[in-house]
Amino acid sequence: MSIERMCGLAQVSRASFYRSLAQKAPWEEEMQVRAALQEIALEHRRRYGYRRMTAELRARGLVVNHKRVARLMRQDNLLAIRGRKFVTTTDSDHELEVYVNLAARMQTTAPNQLWVADITYIRLQCEFVYLAVVLDAYSRRVVGWCADRTLHTRLAITSLEQAITLRQPEPGLVHHSDRGVQYASEAYVKVLRAHGMVPSMSRPGNPYDNAMCESFMKTLKQEEIYCNEYQTLEQLQENVASFIENYYNRCRLHSALGYKSPDHFEGQRSAAAAAVLTAAPKMSFWRHEEIYQSDEQRKQSESGGRI
């Protein structure tokens, strides 16, 4: 049956029919966007704000204005869950040697050039525990961490040794931290020196000098810690391990990385480096021989044929 015939039977004009088709597409697109927002919110446990939601939608092929995303999230009660403010733990009242801030002048271009470290406390049901982390400043990837009941130097050293085992950095890496007694301790600096690392420390009373680690601690607490009620240190360790390895490093989009995850960001660089090596011209053995022979001939010519 033709469209004209159907319109006649329904007693509507063809213009009205085509107008209804045009209006159907935006409605279907709206439902598709809302469904995707629900899926992303569930997948990321409502950790994403509207900007990361917008980036995730685009990665899935849905190009949507961020203001519209914010409106839909508000209407569907999908806004990110935010927790409480937190207090960092730094004891810089000591007589140990401190080091100049080298990180402030650095622009990282690859992994394992600059690591940043920090310690914070986490409140459980019946006790406080402490968490030490080490991040690679290039990709914001967590490369080492340790949680324990006691705020001692061994806590920080364990997270550092985990990072060293994982990354095997070359000598010359800059290690930046605050001026806390754990990082200034002789034992900690000894580990740094043993692996050719250069200590760097924030200025006194200036948390912005270590803003990258502060930002991670805030993310961890708001998106994981404050959303759960841990009874024991063991529960915390299990969940923090899952958050870091399975979510933060692998999946969570980071605005400073162009809305890519740390693993994705590092993977892109590795792929680009491999492509450059593959595309680079290769000189054969015979070409090396030609260059060597022509160089010898030039020397003989310059010396008048004398050897």
Image (cartoon, grey):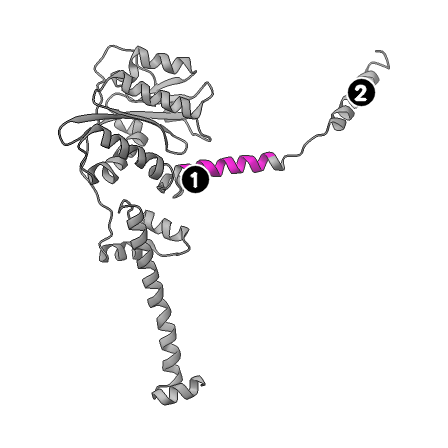
Amino acid at dot 2: Arg
Up-down relation of residue 156 to residue 17 (above or below) = above
- Residue shown at the point (57%, 38%) measured from the top left: 275
Residue 4 percent location from the top left of the image: 43, 87
Question: Observer-nearest residue: 241 or 176?
Answer: 241
Residue 40 percent location from the top left of the image: 32, 50
Residue 214 percent location from the top left of the image: 28, 31
Residue 136, quarter of the rendered image: top left
Work out which quarter of the rendered image holds the N terminus and state it: bottom left
Element marked by disc 2: helix
From the viewer's perspective, is 218 left or right of 16?
A: left
- Residue shown at the point (23%, 29%) measured from the top left: 234
Work out which quarter of the rendered image holds the C terminus and state it: top right
Please state which of the two labelled residues, at mark 1 or mark 2, is closer to the viewer: 1
Residue placed under numbered mark 2 in the picture: 298
- Residue shown at the point (66%, 34%) measured from the top left: 281
Q: CA distance from mark 1 to mark 2?
A: 51 Å
Q: Is residue 272 visible?
A: yes
Element marked by disc 1: helix
Residue 169 percent location from the top left of the image: 45, 22
Question: Observer-nearest residue: 240 or 200?
Answer: 240
- Residue shown at the point (37%, 36%) measured from the top left: 249
Q: How many marks?
A: 2
Q: Is residue 112 magenta?
A: no
From the viewer's perspective, is 307 left or right of 80?
A: right
What span is in magenta?
263-277
Residue placed under numbered mark 1 in the picture: 264
Q: Main secondary structure of the magenta part?
A: helix
